[in-house]
Image: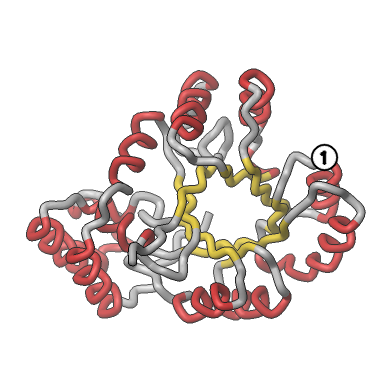
Amino acid sequence: MVQKMAEFVLGTANFNSDYSFKPMTKEECFKILDVARENGIHKLDTATAYDDLWVFEYEQETGHLFTINHKVTTKEDIEDSISSLESQCVMLHDQNDIYNFKKMNELAKIHEGYSYTGVSIYDNENFYDAIKMGFDIIQFQYNIADIRHSSNIGRAKQKGIVTQARSAFLKGLLLMDITSIPVQYSHLKPYLVELDIICVNNNISRAKACLDFVELNKDIDEIVIGVDTAAQLLELIELKKEPNLAAYEEVKTLSNIWDLKLDLRG
């Protein structure tokens, strides 16, 4: 039986916002959205904090509508997001705002076309609470260097909650040349040396190993990815094809040994 692998969700934090180290042009943003549309990526991860004007301009100009997961930070954002009907899922951007869940559900009931509620999680305690509260989608960090949420991911999956992983490359840290690793993460270097050995032996890139690690987790439904160019997105789409199962098993073993719990919040 062929395992169903996690689907991509395109993150929009890099689109014309302060979240990106290298803000892009509107033209490049539209190229990225073209590539997403042409390659079956139907869902976007947006936020009030990201300034997603170009996404909506793209939809208006092309007539193509993406499925929108929209992260909010205030009760007013929640009401505006639901009332606008532009978001199929409204998500709490801050895990500490879980108390707003009741408010989200009350608003959802009076607006037709509104589908799901979600939350972006960092800590296991909040993850467990989010499962009990019945969110439809839970987003969390998961990568080779941080598997702290593994048990709760499985629990969420059993409850029928959509599990959405972010930070597969830990904001690029897992892809850096070892000599360029920031001092505060220097303890990661010997582990990356071990990872590189696996990659060489299996003839794959480190990026491929990191992506397969998340994609092949049977309890993960979706992977949020962020890119700076259309070319980067095409590269990730290509990497997603034909996962290397042998390398995956080796990397999984290595990750369990590491248990680093590195957390770059953003």
264, above or below 20, in the image: below
Viewer-nearest residue: 154 or 174: 154
Residue that appears at 49% across and 61% down: 221
Residue that appears at 25% across and 79% down: 257
Viewer-nearest residue: 15 or 89: 89
SS under mark 1:
helix
Location of residue 92 by image quarter = bottom right
* Left or right, residue 100 beside residue 6: right
User: What is the number of callouts on the image?
Assistant: 1
* Left or right, residue 238 beside residue 8: left
Which part of the image, by quadrant, shows the N terminus?
bottom left
Residue that appears at 29% across and 47% down: 241
Residue that appears at 58% across and 35% down: 17
In the picture as drawn, the residue positioned furthest to the right comes out as 110
In the picture as drawn, the residue positioned furthest to the front comes out as 1
* Left or right, residue 126 beside residue 31: right
Tell me residue 147's x, y (percent). 40, 73
164, above or below 48, in the image: below
Mark 1 neighbour density, 10 Å: few (under 14) some (14–19) many (20 or more): few
Give the residue number, with chain letter if any, for mark 1.
84
Location of residue 136 by image quarter = bottom right
Q: What is the image's colouring?
A: secondary structure
- The three-letter code of the residue at mark 1 reads Ser
155, above or below 28, in the image: below
Tell me residue 139's x, y (percent). 56, 62
Tell me residue 85's x, y (percent). 80, 42
Tell me residue 183's x, y (percent). 29, 59
Viewer-nearest residue: 99 or 264: 99
